[in-house]
């Protein structure tokens, strides 16, 4: 168990908060804004940014009807009123509202009405917040809004009112000027990569000159070097973050190429590494493995990210990101073999050490509860707990603990304060299949025991076996109370499409995938239960699902090699047992 928060983290966070406060105060003064956010006269032409894939016509129809549903919360806008004048359900809702990330949904609706509604909402925003607002113009929200507006430049230029057209474009240039000055106010996280991509794209799209483009590109190169690991994973350890960054870079590269420009060589190198990571995290033909706050991701997003890099060379170990992949006979297993990310990168991390996801050819079978940014915020902390993952939980306690509510969490965000350190993993590939073995000490400080997991995927992909052990390190000596027993639960969360039924003796279960493929789950660890679970990793609302649970009590002085401190289990393919 290691501390994930240091005094340096606290000092950096406090200094960053002070710098943002000073910047907000300075920009509140009209003379400063006049100088710092000058629109300039260098713009000559407009080059739209290629739209990222997305846009849901059903959600767009709700927007037209005045129902804004963002992050699982809904705001109804009465006819004749402005959404910008109404109090929002939460700060998170307001951030997504002002980022205009919902605009692709609105424009996905066919006809002229969506375009007219979009322009009305944009012009209305300008009348309320176009001059300045410390929240709406905060760097992360600003970057997302500018990125969306760059994709709809033809729409911004449309309409019969010339003054309105000029006001939109002038505001876009002013917002870009603010973004250029505010880049350093952002913590060194994925948000700053997004902001640097946006600034570089805006400089090219609006022809703001080489100095603006170079400012964005320099920051982008710096952050890609520090945040994109050698195996292509993002330092946050979220697979979806790698895919999102790569898709945005593909979009930026296409824009630069269209204008006869070449991005820095380091950007292309980062894109190659990111493509390898996206390939690593794919679970079959659709979606990514769901770890550390990242959901499945849309097929369109992944296709955009991998455009031109579909044949990237595969690999099975991501040592810097902390994952192992085993693939055989069309089946894929991905194991989380590291602790949560540290620092600002850990604000969305999960207590998921030693959890895994398993996808046979017929679809996902074993998953984690996962997360998607469209989910209600009330679920967020619950699904970060160890119990929301397919792994072993000791004494119903998470292997990593969040910072408690108070000044420290307010300053640092919802990071983990302590977590497993180190997490060890190794693999052995043989003719018969792949062995993965890993362990962590996330419970050692509190309960005195470590956790070990062994996985074996047979060469035909039809047999996944596992063994979970609870052991006391020899160097720690005997516990104070050798007779004390520790309760444990081993959970296997099933994808919502999987149907499960228990055997009469409750030592096995029949699992049927949506295509009719059957799998048998067996264990020697005592009765297995079917309990309710929930899946939040897709783009829909929370979906009810099922989990297999093996419970027991372990000896506090056990070695993890025999019952009750050792539990073995297996998933074995049966063939077609149901209708597709």
Image: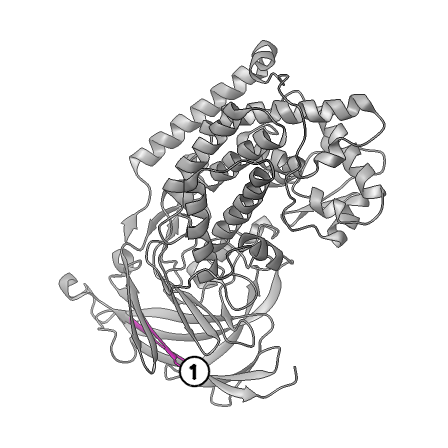
Quadrant of the image for the C terminus?
bottom right
Callout 1 secondary element:
loop
Residue 475's image quarter? bottom left
Residue in the picture at 55% in, 62% down: 287
| Left or right: residue 55 compared with residue 177 | right
Residue 539 visible somewhere in the drawing: yes
Front residue of 387/212: it is 212
Question: What secondary structure do most residues of the magenta stretch adopt?
Answer: strand
Quadrant of the image for the N terminus?
bottom left
Label 1 crowding class (10 Å Cα cut-off): few <14, some 14-19, many 20+?
few
Residues in magenta?
454-469
Please say whether residue 422 is one of the residues in the magenta stretch.
no
Residue 157 percent across, percent down from the top left: 76, 30
Residue 90 visible somewhere in the drawing: no
User: Which residue lies most toward the top here?
Assistant: 31
Which color mode does the image show?
A: one colour
Q: Which residue is mark 1?
A: 460
């Amino acid at each position: 168990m290691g501390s994930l928060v240091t005094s340096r983290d606290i000092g950096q966070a406090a200094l960053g908060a002070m710098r943002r406060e000073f910047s907000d105060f300075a920009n509140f003064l009209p003379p400063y804004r006049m100088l710092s956010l000058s629109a300039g006269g260098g713009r000559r032409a407009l080059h739209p940014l290629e739209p990222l894939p997305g846009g849901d016509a059903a959600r767009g129809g709700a927007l037209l009807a005045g129902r804004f549903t963002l992050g699982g919360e809904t705001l109804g806008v009465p006819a004749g009123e402005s959404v910008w004048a109404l109090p929002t359900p939460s700060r998170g809702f307001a951030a997504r509202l002002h980022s205009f990330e919902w605009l692709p949904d609105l424009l996905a609706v066919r006809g002229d009405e969506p375009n007219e509604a979009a322009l009305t909402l944009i012009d209305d925003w300008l009348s309320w917040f176009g001059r300045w607002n410390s929240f709406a113009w905060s760097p992360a929200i600003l970057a997302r809004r500018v990125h969306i507006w760059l994709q709809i430049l033809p729409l911004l230029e449309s309409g019969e009112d010339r003054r309105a057209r000029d006001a939109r474009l002038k505001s876009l240039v002013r917002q870009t000027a603010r973004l250029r000055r505010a880049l350093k106010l952002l913590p060194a996280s994925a948000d700053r990569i997004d902001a640097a991509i946006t600034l570089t794209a805006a400089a090219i799209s609006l022809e703001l000159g080489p100095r603006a483009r170079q400012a964005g590109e320099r920051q982008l190169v710096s952050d890609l070097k520090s945040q994109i690991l050698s195996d292509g994973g993002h330092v946050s350890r979220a697979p979806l973050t790698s895919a999102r960054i790569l898709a945005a870079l593909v979009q930026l590269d296409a824009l630069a190429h269209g204008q006869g420009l070449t991005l820095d060589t380091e950007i292309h190198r980062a894109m190659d590494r990111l493509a390898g990571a996206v390939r690593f995290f794919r679970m079959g033909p659709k979606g990514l493995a769901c770890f550390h706050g990242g959901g499945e991701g849309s097929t369109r997003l992944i296709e955009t990210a991998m455009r031109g890099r579909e044949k990237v060379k595969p690999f099975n170990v991501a040592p810097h990101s902390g994952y192992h992949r085993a693939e055989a006979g069309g089946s894929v297993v991905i194991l989380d073999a590291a602790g949560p990310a540290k620092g600002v990168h850990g604000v969305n991390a999960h207590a998921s050490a030693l959890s895994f996801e398993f996808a046979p050819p017929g679809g996902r079978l074993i998953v984690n509860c996962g997360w998607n940014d469209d989910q209600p915020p009330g679920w967020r902390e619950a699904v970060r707990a160890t119990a929301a993952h397919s792994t072993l939980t000791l004494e119903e306690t998470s292997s990593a603990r969040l910072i408690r509510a108070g000044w420290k969490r307010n300053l640092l965000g919802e990071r983990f304060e302590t977590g497993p350190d180190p997490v060890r993993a190794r693999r052995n590939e043989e003719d018969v299949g792949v062995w993965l073995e890993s362990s962590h000490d996330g419970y050692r400080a509190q309960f005195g025991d470590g956790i070990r997991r062994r996985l074996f995927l047979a060469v035909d992909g039809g047999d996944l076996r596992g063994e979970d052990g609870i052991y006391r390190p020899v160097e720690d000596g005997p516990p104070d109370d050798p007779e004390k027993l520790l309760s444990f639960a081993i959970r296997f969360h099933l994808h919502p499409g999987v149907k499960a039924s228990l055997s009469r003796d409750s030592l096995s279960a029949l699992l049927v995938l949506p295509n009719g493929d059957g799998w048998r789950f067996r264990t020697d660890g005592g009765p297995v239960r079917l309990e309710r679970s929930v899946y939040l990793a897709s783009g829909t609302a929370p979906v009810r699902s099922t989990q297999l649970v093996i419970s027991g009590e372990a000896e506090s002085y056990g070695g993890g090699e025999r019952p009750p401190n050792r539990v073995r289990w297996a998933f074995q393919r049966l063939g077609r047992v149901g209708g597709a």
